[in-house]
Image (tube, rainbow, N blue to C red):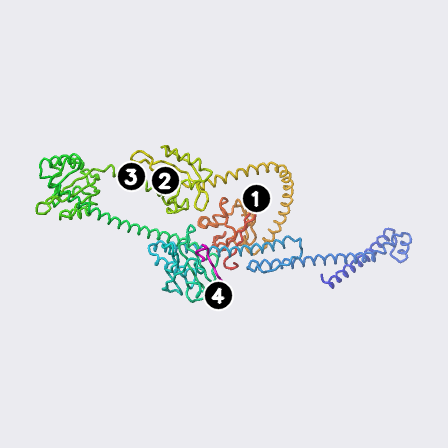
């Protein structure tokens, strides 16, 4: 209150009281004179003072009352001034809070707020609110950055996975496609691709198969020896090398990237299962981030796997080529045998001149072999009983005079016609497996011989056919081959002699033990068995050698001296004499299950010990629990007070704020929310939040769907754009951010809403 105004009020009150005292004195004298039947005069007034001493006190009223009023006015004036001063402070504080809140809503998280009272919970809550919103904003930016990085990595892996699938049959083409696309993807100016050449164990080195620089393919051939420079060092140590401080002469002296001098160098080995297949090297005018390096390492692992597959395919092709050469040598040997057979046949033809021997021979052949004769055009001239019965016919008339094509499957005709054409021209005879077609459409597998019979002038007169039925054996062979192939693919398989010497194994067994097949040559099965289990294993092995059968589990030692558990079946294979010729191991890797078993066992023992400790601590905990409950009750009362203060603070927010419980009921709805939705607070409090959103929005928007459904996890800390429908059926686009608070295991969620037109966030 102004000092001048205060003095004026005191003066008025004092003067009014003085006048009131004078009037009171006059009225009192008048009443006293009237009650004593005295006239109004000075003498009578003096007489009253003499007879009644109380009048002297009444005379002081015009003085006492103003004095009392004066001092009371001064006290009241000071109190009013103090109240006005406090109101002024509160008004300044409210303006200060309002200004701070506006800055926060405008994303000004650098706004400072000086706390005037350390015990003021509202001011502390505002600081915490600013810090929480700032933290949420920073976390959102970081999360968006991480999401962008994850999307970049996922797209890159898909892209390079497709490149690897499309170019896995040509190393040079694959290496250029990889290095050129990687340079573009990670924004590198130069890149080189090195393949490990280890075909000659005495000359292991890296050969540059692709070089890419400044968006152009470069043609450069380089050789880097093992452990030479950073490329060799990266391969030798099987580690990624990243340099962000590159010397001026680095590229020219040590690197395979030419004469450019980039700011950073990244060298990644192409390894899979700790086996090196090559190295990729990049130079950039920028620095590589950690997620880019991790991405290149992941792609390098896929490249190494593809190169490993390509190398295996090359080796397979080489083996196939060797096999073909061996087949040609066998064909030459077969030709020599056939020439011998022709000489034998000539002798046989000479012998057929003797009629009796010929008939005897023919009868024996007819009893043991399928026999038929065809002219050079393929018309059947003669068929014995076995030919007719094996091919499903009942009489000679059913087959004689018919073309040989009726006994050949359509799929085999092209192949058979080439053989027949050669035979009809007097070419070499045919010996081998052949499939014929019966009348019933079934396959008849035979070991067949087609031989040209010539007249005395050397012209082909007819073609003789002899065969043995091996259909059942062929079916069993195909079935056995299929089972063996399936078993070899799906299980771990190895073969050992009865004394334990290695014979053969599949890739799964080699991978399990860590030894290559070459390493296993000359080894013994007992070398792979853990010493603690060796005696028991030898006993079971000897029992199988004697003719029994064994199934069980055992721990074996790998090449790196680690343990692997397998569940295996051990069985013997008999030779023609019924003796055990070898033992076959069929196994499954159960190392992971065993480790889980031992870990669970150890965990169970720890739990039993902890359970005993918990029982001992139970009494102490019960006492502390009672004490904690009392403390929690007190804290709850304090929290309720803070909650009320916070609600009053949030009530004054210019942005709509809605607070809901874990089951979806609305607990707080400020004035800004009432204005946004055009709904009264009393109409929504304690009702489910689904009253605030349309059915279409609840179904189509995942954020709102999770917010409505108590069973679903809320999307906290993620700002989402939606359209809400107000009580006046108006659609308003808003941004909504959900925060979460937990009190006594009870979750509450606060939704901060901003209209997009305001452009606060």
Seen at 25% across and 48% down, the residue is: 327
Q: Mark 4 or mark 3: which comes first in sequence? A: 4
Marks 4 and 2 in Cβ contact (< 8 Å):
no
Dot 3: element: helix
State yes or no: discs 1 and 3 in contact (Cβ < 8 Å): no
Residue picked out by circle 2: 496
The disc, 1 or 3, on the residue closer to the chain's N-terminal end is 3
In three-dimensional space, the C-alpha distance between marks 4 and 1, rounded to whole angstroms, equals 59 Å
Residue 745 is marked as 1
Is 274 inside the magenta-drawn segment? no
Q: Element type at marker 2?
A: strand
The question of residue 241 being in magenta is answered with yes
Q: Is residue 683 visible?
A: no
Numbered mark located on residue 479 in the image: 3
User: With 105 as the anchor, is 412 left or right in this view?
Assistant: left
The alpha-carbon separation of the residues under discs 1 and 2 comes to: 64 Å
Q: Nearer the viewer, mark 2 or mark 3?
A: 2
Cα distance between the residues tagged 4 and 2? 58 Å
Residue at the spot of label 4: 247
Q: Quadrant of residue 4?
A: bottom right
Extent of the magenta region: 233-248
Kindly report the distance in space between the C-alpha atoms of the residues bearing marks 1 and 3: 65 Å
**On the rendered structure, is 751 left or right of 2?**
left
The image shows residue 757 at horizontal and vertical percentages of 50, 59
**N-term-proximal mark, 4 vs 1:** 4
- How far, Cα to Cα, is label 4 from label 3? 66 Å
- Disc 4 and disc 3 in contact, CB within 8 angstroms: no
Describe residue 245's horizontal placement relative to residue 210 as left or right: right
Which dot marks residue 361?
A: none
**260 vs 152, nearest the viewer:** 260
Q: Is residue 459 visible?
A: yes
């Amino acid at each position: 209150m102004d000092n001048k105004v205060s003095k004026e009020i005191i003066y008025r009150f004092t003067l009014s009281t003085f006048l009131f005292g004078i009037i009171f004195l006059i009225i009192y004298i008048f009443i006293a004179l009237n009650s004593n039947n005295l006239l109004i005069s000075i003498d009578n007034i003096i007489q009253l003072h003499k007879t009644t001493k109380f009048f002297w006190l009444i005379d002081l009223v015009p003085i006492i009352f103003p004095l009392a009023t004066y001092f009371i006015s001064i006290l009241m004036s000071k109190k009013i001034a103090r109240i006005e001063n406090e109101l002024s402070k509160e008004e300044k504080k409210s303006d200060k809070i309002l200004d701070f809140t506006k800055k926060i809503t405008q994303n000004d998280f650098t706004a400072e707020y000086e706390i005037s009272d350390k015990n003021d919970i509202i001011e502390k809550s505002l600081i915490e609110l600013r810090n929480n919103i700032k933290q949420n904003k920073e976390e959102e930016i970081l999360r968006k950055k991480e999401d962008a990085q994850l999307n970049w990595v996922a797209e890159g892996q898909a892209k390079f996975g497709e490149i690897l699938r499309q170019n896995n049959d040509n190393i040079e083409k694959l290496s250029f496609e990889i290095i050129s696309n990687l340079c573009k993807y990670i924004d590198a100016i130069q890149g080189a691709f090195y393949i490990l050449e280890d075909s000659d164990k005495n000359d292991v080195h890296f050969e540059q198969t692709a070089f890419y620089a400044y968006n152009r393919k470069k043609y450069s051939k380089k050789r880097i020896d093992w452990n030479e420079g950073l490329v060799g060092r990266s391969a030798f140590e099987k580690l990624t090398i990243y340099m962000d401080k590159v010397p001026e002469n680095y590229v020219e002296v040590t690197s395979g990237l030419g004469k450019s001098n980039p700011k950073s160098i990244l060298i990644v080995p192409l390894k899979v299962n700790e086996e090196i297949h090559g190295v990729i090297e990049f130079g950039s005018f920028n620095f590589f981030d950690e997620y880019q390096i991790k991405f290149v390492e992941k792609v390098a692992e896929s490249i190494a796997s593809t190169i490993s597959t390509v190398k295996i395919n090359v080796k397979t092709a080489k083996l196939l080529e060797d096999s073909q050469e061996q087949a040609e040598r066998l064909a030459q040997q077969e030709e020599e045998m056939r020439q011998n057979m022709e000489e034998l046949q000539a002798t046989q033809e000479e012998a057929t001149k003797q009629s009796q021997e010929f008939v005897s021979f023919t009868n024996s052949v007819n009893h043991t072999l399928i026999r038929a004769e065809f002219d050079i055009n393929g018309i059947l001239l003669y068929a014995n009983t076995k030919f007719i019965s094996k091919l499903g016919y009942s009489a000679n008339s059913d087959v004689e005079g018919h073309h040989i094509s009726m006994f050949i499957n359509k799929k085999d005709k092209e192949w058979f016609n080439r053989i027949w054409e050669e035979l009809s021209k007097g070419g070499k005879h045919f010996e081998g497996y052949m499939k014929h077609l019966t009348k019933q459409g079934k396959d008849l597998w035979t070991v067949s011989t087609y031989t040209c019979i010539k007249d005395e002038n050397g012209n082909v007169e007819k073609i003789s056919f002899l065969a043995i039925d091996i259909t059942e054996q062929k079916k069993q062979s195909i079935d056995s081959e299929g089972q063996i192939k399936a078993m070899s693919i799906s299980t771990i398989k190895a073969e050992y002699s009865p004394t334990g010497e290695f014979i053969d194994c599949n890739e799964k067994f080699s991978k399990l033990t860590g030894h290559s097949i070459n390493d296993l040559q000359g080894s013994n099965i007992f070398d792979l068995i853990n010493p603690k289990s060796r005696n028991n294993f030898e006993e079971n092995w000897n029992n199988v050698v004697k003719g029994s059968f064994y199934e069980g589990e055992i721990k074996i030692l790998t090449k790196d001296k680690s343990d692997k558990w397998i569940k295996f079946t051990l069985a013997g294979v008999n030779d023609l004499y019924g003796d055990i010729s070898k033992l076959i191991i069929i196994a499954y890797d159960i190392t992971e299950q065993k480790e889980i078993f031992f870990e669970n066992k150890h965990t169970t023992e720890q739990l039993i010990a902890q359970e005993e400790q918990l029982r001992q601590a139970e009494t102490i905990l019960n006492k502390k629990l009672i004490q904690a409950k009392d403390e929690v009750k007190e804290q709850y009362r304090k929290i309720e007070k803070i909650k009320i203060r916070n609600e009053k603070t949030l009530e004054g927010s210019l942005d709509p704020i809605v607070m809901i419980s874990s089951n979806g009921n609305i607990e707080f709805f400020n004035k800004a929310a009432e204005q946004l939705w055009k709904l009264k607070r009393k109409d929504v409090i304690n009702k489910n939040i689904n009253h605030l959103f349309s059915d279409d929005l609840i179904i189509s928007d995942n954020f709102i769907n999770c917010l409505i459904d108590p069973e679903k996890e809320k999307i906290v800390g993620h700002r989402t754009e939606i359209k809400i429908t107000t009580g006046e059926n108006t659609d308003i686009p808003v941004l909504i951010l959900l925060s979460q608070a937990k009190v006594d295991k009870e979750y509450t969620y606060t939704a901060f809403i901003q209209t997009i037109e305001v452009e606060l966030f």
